[in-house]
Image (cartoon, rainbow, N blue to C red):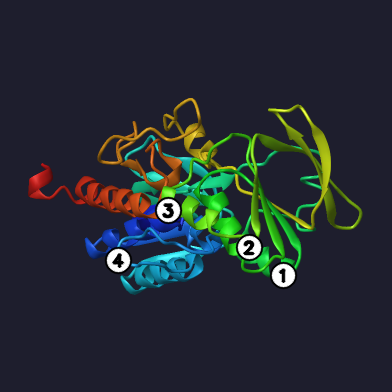
Amino acid sequence: MEIWDLVIVGGGPAGLAAGIYGARSGLKTLVLEEKMAGGTTLDAPLVENYPGLQNIGGMELAQKLAAHCRSSGVEVREFEGVSGLELKGARKIVKTNKNAYEAGAIIIASGAHYRAIDVPGEKEFHGRGVSLCALCDGPLFKGKRALVVGGGNSAIMTALYLAELASEVKIVHRRDAFRAEAALVKDLEARKNIEVLWNSEIREIKGERTVSKVTLFNSRSGEIKEMSIDGVFVQIGQDPNSQLAGEAGVVVDEYGYVIVDCLQRTNIAGVYAAGDITNHPVKQVGTAVGQGITAAVEAHGYIRRPYYKQ
């Protein structure tokens, strides 16, 4: 079993920021990430609201965060998923698909996963016309017809990105107003090849080898109709990756988000949480970074017990 001062579960913006501050505080710090470091920021076509960077590609920002983290002395291990947590003792245990680690403190920053719309055809056509990532799959729909599901920031950003590639983009939103930032909505309204289908939802995704049409239901008129389409991009929000934390005794709220205080402390001493997995109401790269920093500073105080923490 490897011994570390601080183990961070998750390599998104919160985990990477925590890693930087943990290492700079003198802690032997490990970040474990089941996929590529960067989290869902990797999927963002463009980030326009991170202070100091007027606009930057999500993948570029994620890569910069990961490079900064590594250059600070943090060991970042990608494609190593965590399979179990033992958090009640003085020393915390993290088990993965490759190893086991002991640490003085743990920061849980495992983020969230994309929600599904749970309609017939969604799973069957995943990767064959149904996508969760415009940056990954958008180029496949150059000159084709794309449909985006959702009404928040991620849905609007996805539609704006696809409008540069697809011949036409439609947004299906179950309400009659967006919940996205006003600046994004303004950009959307200026695009002539984007159409919004209000008060609508997908009932079924159809096709043969790939997606060719969807069935739509309008809740206002009661109308059901079919629409020809080449790609469906689902952007309806996320759910927290908190199952392992909950099983290990970390308290979560009714929606599964880890409950933290203003110092990112959970109900278990020496266990912190940061980023989209927490019950913080704002889910942004900037807030995730701030939470990660706070968690690392508090973890350092817990482990080293400096005079100002005694």
Q: Are marks 2 and 1 in contact (CB under 8 Å)?
A: no
Q: Earlier in the sequence, mark 4 or mark 3?
A: 4
Q: Position of residue 82 (x, y in %)?
A: 53, 50
Q: Read off the residue under disc 1.
A: 142
Q: Are marks 3 and 2 in contact (CB under 8 Å)?
A: no
Q: Amino acid at mark 4?
A: Gly
10 Å crowding of disc 4: few (<14), some (14-19), many (20+): few
Who's the residue at 76% across and 53% down the image? 126
Give the number of the disc on residue 162. 2
Position of 103 compared to 192: left or right? left
Q: Which corner quadrant holds the N terminus?
A: bottom left
Q: CA distance from mark 1 to mark 3?
A: 26 Å
10 Å crowding of disc 3: few (<14), some (14-19), many (20+): few
Which label lies toward us, 1 or 3?
Answer: 3
Q: Earlier in the sequence, mark 3 or mark 2?
A: 2
Which label lies toward us, 3 or 2?
Answer: 3
Give the number of the disc on residue 183. 3
Q: Amino acid at mark 2?
A: Leu
The one nearer the camera, 273 or 125, is 125
